[in-house]
Every structure is written in structure tokens, then in C-alpha cells.
Image: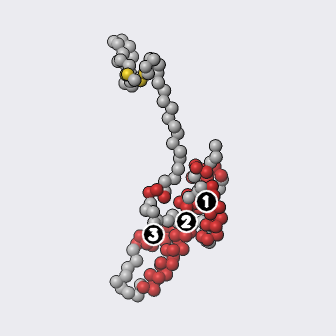
Amino acid sequence: MIAQQSPRRGEKSSSILKLIGAKGEKETRKKEPQPLELKIEQELPQSAKCLMDCEAADILQGIQEQIILLSKDPTIKIPVSFDKGLQYTKRTSHYTNPQSVRKVLETLTKYGVSDGEISVIANVCPETTDEVFALVPSLKVE
């Protein structure tokens, strides 16, 4: 391929070079659309597990109960971030029984939905299939 020569005097100049093929025809390149996918689990260590907010709330609640027992020891202090995390999970959790939610959403794994995507669906609590497809585009069959 060669670049087209710059325009002559008096012609409109273009800052973009047009690429031409051997026969002098303009070459067009079709860009393949990139598949949309959540990359949640790719960014986490392999030993990490994605949790639903209700699962995280249960775990943090259990830890808080243990900390209360240990709080008699003055050397142990509860970090502010722990309390903020616990309050966030309680506030954003839509469910009270994580096991039931996980059992219902586990059926999505036979369609290739990952644990991270299941957690996203559970945390957002979409009301329509369009919202689910917006969250997990790989579910949409075209």
C-alpha cells in the first residue's frame, strides 16, 4: 500500500492520508466488534471469590460478633473501614437468605455465566431481561 500524495495548491487539504491498494482502489477495513464481557474475575487473584452483598454482609456480621467478644482487649481496635464496609453491605443487600439466592442463580452457570457475573446480577437486582443483558452481554443470543 502507498499513501496518496498531498493535494495540489488550491485543493482542499486533508490531514488524513487515504490508503490505496495496488489497483488504486480505496481499501476499507472492517473492524470486528469486540465482544462485551465483564472482566471482574480476570482482574482478581485466582484464589479470590466474588461475593454477593448479602453473602458479604453475613461474613462481616460474623466477624463483628467475634470482634465484640475480643473488644474487651484494649489493644484490639476495630478499623473505621470495617464498619463502613459492614454498613454498606447491609444497606445494599436486597436479600436476607444468601443460600437461597445463590441456589436460584446457580442455574445460570449452565449458560456460561461466571460466579462474578452471578454476583453482579444479584447485587444489582435487575427487573427486566434487558437489564440482565446490559449487565451480562454474553448471555444475549444473537
Marks 3 and 1 in Cβ contact (< 8 Å): no
Occupied quadrant, residue 55: bottom right
Residue 62, percent across and down? 51, 78
Query: Mark 3 = which residue?
Result: 84
Residue 142, percent across and down? 64, 43
Q: Secondary structure at mark 2?
A: loop
Tag 1 or tag 3, which sits nearer the N-term? 3
Residue 137, percent across and down? 58, 49
Residue at screen point 35% across, 13% down: 8
Residue at screen point 49% across, 57% down: 40
Q: Is residue 22 left or right of residue 107?
A: left
Residue 108, percent across and down? 63, 59
Q: Secondary structure at mark 1?
A: helix
> Closer to the camera: disc 3 or disc 2?
2
Crowding near the residue tagged with mark 3, few <14, some 14–19, many ≥20 C-alpha atoms within 10 Å = few
Scheme of image coloration = secondary structure
Q: Is residue 58 visible?
A: yes
Q: Is residue 86 above or below residue 114?
A: below
> Closer to the camera: disc 3 or disc 1?
1
What is the distance, in whole Å, between disc 3 and disc 2 at their CAs? 17 Å
Residue at screen point 45% across, 66% down: 47
Say which mark, if any, is on residue 52. Answer: 2
Quadrant of the drawing holding the N terminus: top left
Which of these two is toward me, 132 or 140? 140
Question: What type is the residue that disc 2 sits on?
Answer: Met
Question: What type is the residue that disc 1 sits on?
Answer: Thr
Q: Secondary structure at mark 3?
A: helix
Question: What type is the residue that disc 3 sits on?
Answer: Lys
Q: Is residue 1 above or below residue 46?
A: above
Query: Mark 1 = which residue?
Result: 109
